[in-house]
Image (cartoon, grey):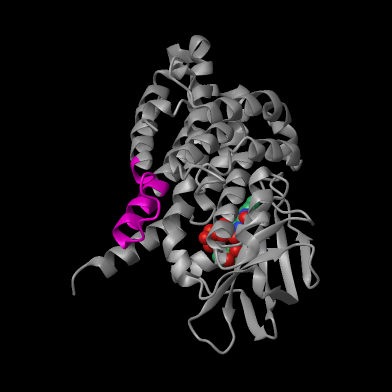
Amino acid sequence: MTQADLAVDASSKAQPVHPLIASVRDIARNQLAGQVQAIDRGLYPADVLRKLAAAGAMSAHLNAPHGHGDYALAIQAMAEVAKVCGATGFMMWCQAVCGLYMQEASASKLAGQPLSDHVAGKRLGGTALSNPMKTYAQIESFLLQAKPVDGGYRVNGALPWVSNLKRDHYCGAIATLEGSPGREMMFLLRCDAPGMTLRQCPSFSGMEGTGTYALHLSDYFVPQHEVIADPAKPLIKRIRAAFVMLQCGIAAGVIQGAIDSMWAVEPQLGHVNQYLEDRPDTLQAELDELLARVMKLAATPCNDSDEFFIEVLDARAHGAELSLRAAQSALLHQGARGYLMDSEVQRRVRESHFVAIVTPAIKHLRSEIARLSQEEMPA
Ligand SMILES: Cc1cc2nc3c(=O)[nH]c(=O)nc-3n(C[C@H](O)[C@H](O)[C@H](O)COP(=O)(O)OP(=O)(O)OC[C@H]3O[C@@H](n4cnc5c(N)ncnc54)[C@H](O)[C@@H]3O)c2cc1C
């Protein structure tokens, strides 16, 4: 996959387009675009997500036979969708990383039929890993506790928000193990199992259609065959770069959408917009450079060195910062029409805020880069 293939902007019509991207673009334009306002107000787009999954849009990164081990293609597919709807792009990421957890659960049955159903979009799922990721980065502590029992574990605790969920969905989660300090267990958490309650979250300023709930676990039983990894740390070390790198697809789509909105008003407002900073051609050059960097990183997603992870964190931070700048500049370019409540420009400002605060948030990224860089320095 070359940068030229990352045809997320209108100017790339002449570039060759991967068949998967052509299908994703068709679903985004013809099925998703008409629902974006409703999704912004709280509609969960299950049908679109299932269609995207069936097209292979959330599994290109998985190993054969489920995917092609192509992270660049997975990022590109996410960008195509996030350009139209950042919330749906985010849910693609949730489904994509959940599939990765199931694939890596090679010791259990999860990597068999459950993963096939997940890849086909028959089942949907998410990831409850914000809290563990922040805990591993030493900025939070674990919210779920597991106790070993006959045939599995009992888990207790609560998580404030997990997305891409409904009653019959599931997500990857991590709990600390009672009696084993420093050891955690990763498992598939089923929303419809006994001991699990989904609670409505307060209204968010954006991302309302992302099926986001608070999770409360009371003596929730994890059978041995739903364990993804015990201990969890070696798996997290192996997939942490992939987890973060895939999010660059959401950022790329939000940025490209903002740039396209600036060009859309150029004929009417170019004479005065020329005095603004962050003009669309400048932002496009910066996005193209960032994407070239991400595509290079995407060629070796399983590199588990700290040095590589720092590179990925840095690219992800650049994506979040550029999302904020691009969305803000699109608003300035569009003026009052971009300030209308149902304007895509206005919605994208809120989506860009989410790119900046979802784990790893910009502050988390910077603290992790600082922590790992210090560890890398010779004593
Ligand atoms: C719309 C939405 C969807 C999300 N989806 C997921 C998901 O799918 N999976 C996932 O693991 N995480 C999810 N999160 C959480 C997200 O990834 C971040 O962890 C969260 O935005 C806080 O990150 P932070 O690093 O800025 O922490 P801070 O905002 O600095 O907060 C520190 C801690 O306090 C908690 N906190 C802050 N305010 C509140 C509050 N009002 N009520 C309860 N707790 C609070 C935070 O969760 C965090 O643990 C979602 C958040 C939002 C807003």
Left or right relative to 300: residue 16: right
Image spot of residue 16 (x, y percent): 44, 20
Q: Give the range drawn in magenta.
A: 296-316
Q: Residue at the top extreme?
A: 267
* Total residue callouts: 0
Q: Is residue 28 above or below residue 350?
A: above
Residue at 56 percent of width and 62 percent of height:
129
Q: Does the magenta stretch include residue 156?
A: no
Image spot of residue 242 (x, y percent): 45, 52
Q: Is residue 207 above or below residue 31?
A: below
Q: Which quadrant would the N terminus be assigned to in this image? A: top left
> What secondary structure characterizes most of the magenta part?
helix
Q: Does the magenta stretch include residue 310?
A: yes
User: 4 or 286: nearer the eye?
Assistant: 4
Using the rendered view, name the quadrant where residue 92 is placed: top right
Left or right relative to 219: residue 294: left
Image spot of residue 133 (x, y percent): 50, 64
User: 3 or 336: nearer the eye?
Assistant: 3
Query: Would residue 53 be seen by someone viewing this image from the given angle?
Result: yes
Left or right relative to 345: residue 262: left
Quarter of image, ligand 1 = bottom right
Image spot of residue 363 (x, y percent): 44, 57
Left or right relative to 120: residue 279: left
Query: Would residue 206 be seen by someone viewing this image from the given angle?
Result: no
Q: Residue at the bottom extreme?
A: 179
